[in-house]
Amino acid sequence: MKPVFSARLLHKNPHAWPWRLALCWMIVLLPLVGSAKSVTAAEVMEFAEEEVKERLALLDQSLLEHRLDDAVRRLIQYHLRYPNQTARNVGRAVAYFPIFEAELAAAGLPATLKYLPVIESALLPRALSRVGAEGLWQFMPYTAPEYGLRIDSLVDERLDAQLATQAAIRYLQSAHEYLGDWSLAIAAYNCGKGRANRAKRRSGGRNFWSARRHFPRETRNYVPAFIAAVYLTEFYAAHGIAPDLPSLDEQLLERMVVYEPLSFYRIAQVTDLSVEFIQQLNPAYLRGYLPGYRGGHNLLLPERVMPAVRTYLTRYGHLQDEPALPWASVLQLPPSGLSYQDDYHRILSFPTPGDSLESIAERLQLSVSQLSIWNNLSPLDTLTGDDAISYYRVANYRRLPERSAPAEIELLAANQTHLPESINTAQHELTARTIFLTLTKRQKPSQVLERYQNLDAKTFLLVNEIEDDGTLPAGTRLELGACSTVVNKP
């Protein structure tokens, strides 16, 4: 659990590390050098310092005192001079803040803690430090299991947004109970509970500001970085920064728990999403499939495709071997969710007297963060009846494609040979005049024979190359014979 703003750690994403390196040096060198354009601090920040203090005073002071000290001021100045990273962070927050907010609320922790991943990982789910900390919350591989995260050759739960948030909550709860103050708990997330306690003891103080000079240098800048991240993410719109939003398929997400093994290939066929996009949303699965461990696995996908996934799992999720489905080839699927913007619609809502973003979000069952970012507002802004609040809903849900009957069925119909009504077409397949049965559970050949009349046992065993009455696994495909001679017993 190391900060992105640290001078000792860099993100290994080649597109992301230069700005962090520049920021690290900026913390040290900004007071010593002027800008190339000789821009004053007031011109860079583009607001009066008193306005910044007033905005910081609106934030949750019970968590920590949001001071505008020199370090906080320098960080805000830097990011306003180079606003692209803030725009990207705010854009990613639409997807991840709802997850953080829900877990923090369930645990009874302050919602402001959701900003920690902004400085830990820049809200990049695969952020990797050079010392091995990984994920949104930057857990080290040897501390992750201590907080309930599994790491093996198939899964790395540090990369699961919900599970990593739950693990971070366990750490923060423990740190707060041990240190008695949230600002010290935030500092401990960077330097550890032991160092934070030593700084507290040596200073005789009870919060970060009173103990600051006794912390390691990296941690002395960590809490100011947290305050700057909170300020910039809350009040970016006041400085003309527009969020760099991803596609709506990456914003309106839904999580479900899957208990059976399930491959990304099959999810792609069911949802019409690419394997690469599914992997992007579910980086915790290292081999391209959910392995089916006891307790289940989180699957995060666009909300609009979930009806298809739920239907598929209801019909086929219990099978040991996934059935062959005559749907789109994965190689023909689009590379991302960008081509599905038309499956969403934008809706306008007008506040009524007494409304706030929080009350509107609760009424619409949306995250406050989502609603504020979509409208370039701070959750602390006062609304009027003239403010049109926009939000997004799914317009077209993906449904599971029905399995079309093979062309041979038309031939059978022309010959007036009909499939008995008692035959379940979800389990049976017609080819010419032959019925094939796919077992939905483990069964013995004798049990199959008991279900069907006029089925010659010797022929059945010979055609299916069965030598004994051993149990057949679910998913086994058996030839039953001509449909005119097969009748399923009730």
Image (tube, rainbow, N blue to C red):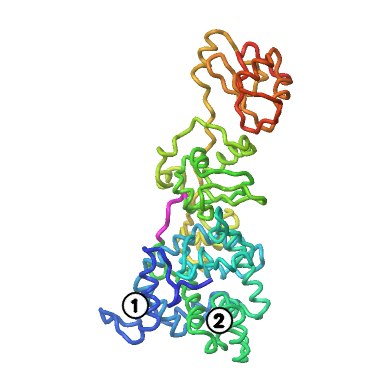
State yes or no: residue 120 in magenta. no
Q: Earlier in the sequence, mark 1 or mark 2?
A: 1
Nearer to the camera, 399 or 155: 155
Determine the residue located farthest toward the front in the rendered image. Answer: 467
Q: Give the percent coordinates (x, y) of residue 157.
A: 57, 58
Image point 54% across, 29% down: which residue?
Answer: 402
Quadrant holding the N terminus? bottom right
Say what amino acid the circle numbered 2 marks.
Glu
Q: Give the percent coordinates (x, y) of residue 120.
A: 49, 70
Question: Residue under circle 1?
Answer: 44
- Number of residues whose C-alpha sits closer than 10 Å to that of mark 2, classed few (under 14), some (14–19) or many (20 or more): some
Callout 1 touching callout 2 (CB < 8 Å): no
Q: Decide if residue 89 is on the left or right side of residue 173.
A: left
Q: Which mark is residue 177?
A: none
Magenta segment, prevailing SS (helix, strand or loop): loop
Question: Residue under circle 2?
Answer: 65
Report the number of numbered marks: 2
Nearer to the camera, 445 or 454: 445
**SS assignment at label 1:** helix
Q: Give the percent coordinates (x, y) of residue 325.
A: 52, 32
**SS assignment at label 2:** loop
- Measure the C-alpha gap from mark 1 to mark 2: 24 Å
Res 20 quadrant in image:
bottom left
Image point 71% across, 14% down: which residue?
Answer: 453
Quadrant holding the C terminus? top right
Image point 58% across, 78% down: which residue?
Answer: 192
Determine the residue located farthest toward the left in the rendered image. Answer: 37
| Residue stretch rendered in magenta on the structure | 244-249
Q: Decide if residue 405 is on the left or right side of residue 38.
A: right
Determine the residue located farthest toward the top in the rendered image. Answer: 415
- Number of residues whose C-alpha sits closer than 10 Å to that of mark 1, classed few (under 14), some (14–19) or many (20 or more): some
